[in-house]
Image (spheres, rainbow, N blue to C red):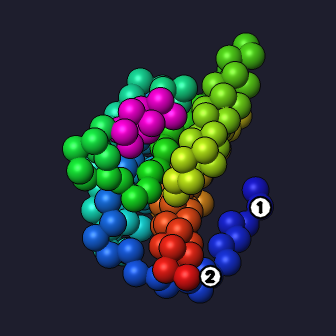
Amino acid sequence: MADARRAPLKDQTDIAGARVLIVEARFYDDIQDALLEGALAELKSAGASHDVITVPGALEIPAAIAIAIDAAAANGKPYDAAIALGCVVRGDTIHFEIVSQESSRGLMDLAVSRKFPLGNGILTVNTEAQAWARARASELNKGGDAARAAIAMLRIKRRLAKA
């Protein structure tokens, strides 16, 4: 396995008080707990608050984010960023390819079309062992990485809005 490479991000634009939505697919509960733990630690460190919505699987994540973004804005409490967390493990059919590709496509479509900061923490792996290596904060910490990505994109959005 390749070593995780995390370049330090120099943008320290203040995001304290930001509202971040986490949408998690609870298909593999234990792996999901580890992903969520990593994401929550990063949000706490950044001073951001969060809400968590749980959906059945990775395919439902993009729609849930879109629904929540619209509902929060309509209620006067918009989200500033979102984090998608889930796990898709390769099986014997093409279902893996469909779920992994379409959930990622849906997230990218949301981020680009709505210009919305989003971190993709949906693991797409061949085995549960690979998922665990990526989910644990003591190893690759992909939940934390997804939160860092959302935070980095939010910082860029806020900094450029002031320019």
Closest to the camera, between mark 2 and mark 1, is 2
Residue 49 vs 46, above or below: the answer is above
Magenta region, residue range? 62-70
Residue 145 lies in quadrant:
bottom right
> Percent position (x, y) of residue 90?
68, 27
Residue 123 lies in quadrant:
top right
Where disc 1 sits, the SS reads loop
Q: Which residue corresponds to mark 2?
A: 8
Q: Name the amino acid type tagged 2.
A: Pro
- Quote the CA–CA distance across marks 2 and 1: 18 Å
Q: Which residue corresponds to mark 1?
A: 2
> Percent position (x, y) of residue 11?
56, 83
The residue under the point 34% across, 34% down is 54
Residue 33 vs 128, above or below: the answer is below
The residue under the point 49% across, 44% down is 84
Q: Residues within 10 Å of mark 1 (few under 14, many from 20)?
A: few
Q: Is residue 5 magenta?
A: no
